[in-house]
Amino acid sequence: MVGPDLVTGTFLKWSGIVEGRDHGFLYVMPFYANSPLRFDPIHHTATLISSDENLHGDGKLDDGVLADNGFIYAILAAADRVLKISPLIFRP
């Protein structure tokens, strides 16, 4: 296992992984979690992505897709709106 312990509290916190165009970072959509997760497979680190969006509730976003414009869009499960992630903003 790599990265911090992110599993405490509930199961299925994240669902669906998308590779961004920012040096291979992986973005994981929140299902029961309240924030998307960015995973760096080279350095084995995981970072929660803060958002202005209210991502509380259960079964929010099921998967995501990388669009031609470089943004990642999260597909709705039970969320009210589509989540848009800009991977380039989160470069180290």
Image (spheres, rainbow, N blue to C red):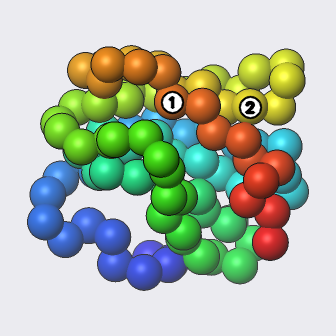
What residue is pinned by disc 1? Answer: 83
Q: In which quarter of the image is residue 72?
A: top right
What residue is pinned by disc 2? Answer: 71
Residue 29 in the image: x percent, y percent? Answer: 46, 40
Mark 1 surroundings: few (<14), some (14-19) or many (≥20) residues within 10 A: many
In the image, farthest residue toward the front: 52
Tag 2's secondary structure? loop
Tag 1's secondary structure? strand
Q: How far apart are marks 2 and 1 (CA)?
A: 10 Å
* Amino acid type at mark 2: Phe
The one nearer the camera, 20 or 86, is: 86
Quadrant housing the N terminus: bottom left
In the image, farthest residue toward the left: 9
For the point 82% across and 31% down, the residue is 70
Mark 2 surroundings: few (<14), some (14-19) or many (≥20) residues within 10 A: some
Residue 82 sits above or below residue 70 on the image: above
For the point 85% across and 19% down, the residue is 68
Residue 48 in the image: x percent, y percent? Answer: 48, 64
